[in-house]
Amino acid sequence: MLFTDRVEAGRLLAARLEHLRGRDVVVLGLPRGGLPVAAAVAEALGAPLDVCLVRKLGVPSHPELGMGAIGEDGVRVLGQDVLRQAHVQPEALARVEERERRELERRSARYRGERPPAAVVGRTVVIVDDGVATGSTARAACRTVRARGAARIVLAVPVAPPDWTDRLAGEADELVCLATPADFFAVGQFYADFAQLDDEDVVTWLRRAADRRAPADQEVEVEAGAVRLGGHLTVPPGATGVVVFAHGSGSGRRSPRNRFVAAGLNEAGLGTLLFDLLTEEEAEDRANVFDTVLLAARLTDATAWLRAQPAAEGLAVGYFGASTGAAAALRAAAEPGARIAAVVSRGGRPDLAEPRLPAVTAPTLLIVGGADLTVLDLNRQARARLHCESRLTTVPGATHLFEEPGALEAVTELARDWFTDHMAAAHV
């Protein structure tokens, strides 16, 4: 015995697949026994989970002996040696295939309902089962996924016979197996718990995986030192990073301009945290609005809180600052160990962070309205003090609040591209 159960096998297998984390990966489990293994792999890699529907074609007189397998999209794999040795006639093969095709269609409707199969075109697909015996099912799965347009296929199993790579050579781009024992007889002999699963078990595993990947979109209380600040956290499935907004001029998480930008970032697959940098009482004192040291400290505390949230675990963090909030963002990004992937300033006052600008290491994009001449000059001077990768971009004709038609859309596109490029690199 090697594994306690399929879940333990999946967790061990996931550790061997860690090099795939952060890539565009989808995990497909072979039902029914492969689903618990695949679910553990998908959770560990932060990847979506679906089923890869294939059916073994059993020899009519010995159904447990596979003479081939079929998959979706008309894929069929036959074991010519078994067909020949078992003297299977074409008519008998056709009857078996017809029966298994009906079962394939039934399972698709039961497991997925109205949901279409997971998109695999151009992606890395990890096909997972609880083990390989003859290899015919795995071969059909690989060919099915290849026919659907996968860019790369990884076949991963906890256990297989010693010659499994010879049997499946060329079917997948990468073969991963935890153990290939010499005394291999059947997959089940290497599990303490190898209970048979039914359709409801498969549906349950798929539902749990979908629930784990549901987007976080909720009102939150951000802990920042001794105070609690209202906020809103949104993390789409598969996000590579979360952008924390630092509002300026006393505005808060309900700033319509920042909410507009945040929505655009969410559509691009980036998470966002909008929160109030000041309590209601603190905001009444206008001096606090310009206290960039205080605001930066709040931003640093909020970042620590964010990184402890399950929805943001392991994700890159960026800052989007507006007006005085941009100075707070740059001050916070300059802190030792800040680990900020990127900073974007919208109509910001980076000059207010002047003493800390040379210490900023995060790639920084400064966006200024072309008609906001005073702030544009301040941004030019501040950029000269930055030692990190930086860019100053103007939005033609825009004033300080970017109220002109199309101006805020331009800001959103610039911020989206800057964060997407730099967060993807930081996440990998």
Image: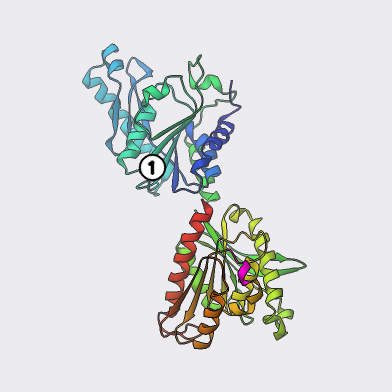
Tell me residue 315's x, y (percent). 57, 55
Amino acid under label 1?
Ala
- The crowding category of the residue bearing disc 1, from other C-alpha atoms within 10 Å (few below 14, some 14 to 19, many at least 20), is few
Residue 295 drawn above or below residue 158: below
Which secondary structure type mostly characterizes the magenta part of the structure?
A: helix
Rendered-image quadrant of the N terminus: top right
Count of numbered marks: 1
Q: Circle 1 is placed at which residue position?
A: 109
Asked whether, in this view, residue 338 is left or right of residue 171, the answer is right
Residue 66 drawn above or below residue 311: above
Asked whether, in this view, residue 281 is left or right of residue 239, the answer is right
- Provide the secondary structure element on which disc 1 rests: helix
Colour scheme used in the picture? rainbow
Answer yes or no: is residue 149 visible.
Answer: yes
Tell me residue 2's x, y (percent). 58, 23
The residue under the point 70% across, 69% down is 297
The residue under the point 52% across, 84% down is 377
The magenta region covers: 357-361
Residue 424 or 164: which is nearer the viewer? 424
Q: Is residue 49 magenta?
A: no
Quarter where residue 324 is shown: bottom right
The residue under the point 56% across, 64% down is 362
Tell me residue 236's x, y (percent). 51, 58
Residue sticking out furthest to the left: 90
The residue under the point 52% across, 79% down is 380
Q: Is residue 358 magenta?
A: yes
Asked whether, in this view, residue 164 is left or right of residue 159, the answer is left
Answer yes or no: is residue 229 visible.
Answer: no
Residue sticking out furthest to the right: 226
Residue 230 drawn above or below residue 140: below
Residue 388 drawn above or below residue 257: above
